[in-house]
Amino acid sequence: MKTLLLKWLACLALVLLLAGCGDKTVLFSGLAENDANDIIAELNQHQIAAQKLIEKSGISVAVDAENIERSVKILDSAGLPRKARTNLGEVFQKSGVISSPMEERARYIYALSQEVESTLAQIDGVVVARVHVVLPERLAPGEPVQPASASVFIKYHNNLDPDSIEPRIRQMVATSIPGLAGKSDKDLAIVFVPAQTYEDRIEVVQMGPFQLSPASYSTVKWIFSLLAIVVLAAVGLTLFRPGRKLRLGKAKNAAAAGEK
């Protein structure tokens, strides 16, 4: 009986532990090491525990299923994970395929915009940076050359001041793209859009005189569950230990003899 009780309690403890540890949902997969670390650091600031999983295709980040909605909103507000960009070396890799002049031009424009976007993304406070480039081009023989132009889209956090950073962005983009140096504002448009700030409203769980967040409440709940298992085990061992069983048998015999 004692062995049966211990097996039952062990199974119950295992079920509770598996229920507490197995409720994970993959948030992103195929990430680079830096992106995964940035995501985990951002979620930790909002008291969301994230787990990093190493896989063949990259790194995955998993969180508790109950935190999926909050995690997505938090990371979207922070601009994470960052968009993967291609540099000039990757676009113009050596291959045996001969490209047409139009294909080479398109690849060059794409690579140039990617390089400028990558540089703009390094500015503190920039969440998303997009650059659209138009290089000088003669559409048909005898027609005038279409001038170069570019448009820049910047989504930024509150810690970035658009008025102070715009002249430097304008100068950097104008000197990075052929044909834009010295052009007027109409040829180089820069648009700043403030990023939507996510207000992390954490639901508070009332537990007697204490107020706990859902993550803390979940931890406390499993601690109390394990304590309950320990108490049940202690009570079971007390009730079914051999000495007590022997005393109970003697008491029953004595009661039967007294009745006779």
Image (cartoon, grey):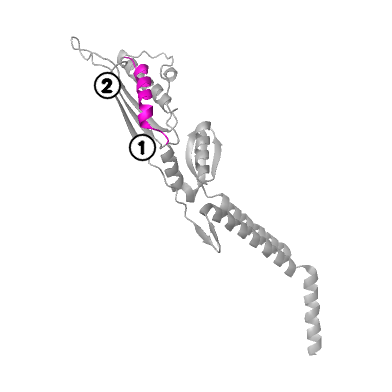
Q: Amino acid at mark 1?
A: Pro
Give 148 or 223, whichever is nearer the viewer: 148
Q: Position of residue 50 (x, y in %)?
A: 53, 43
Q: Name the chief secondary structure element in magenta.
A: helix
Q: What is the crowding at mark 1: few (fewer than 14 residues within 10 Å), some, or many (at least 20)?
A: some
- Work out how far the residue at label 2 is from the one at label 1, CA to CA, in angstroms: 23 Å
The quarter holding residue 258 reads: bottom right
The quarter holding residue 177 reads: top left
Q: Residue at x 79, y 80 (%)?
A: 251
Q: Using the rendered image of the protein, determine whether residue 1 is visible from the camera's viewpoint.
A: no
Residue behind mark 1: 194
- Secondary element under disc 1, as helix, strand or loop, is strand
Decide: is 124 above or below 244.
above
Highlighted range, magenta: 159-178
The mark that comes first in sequence, 2 or 1, is 2
Q: Amino acid at mark 2?
A: Asp
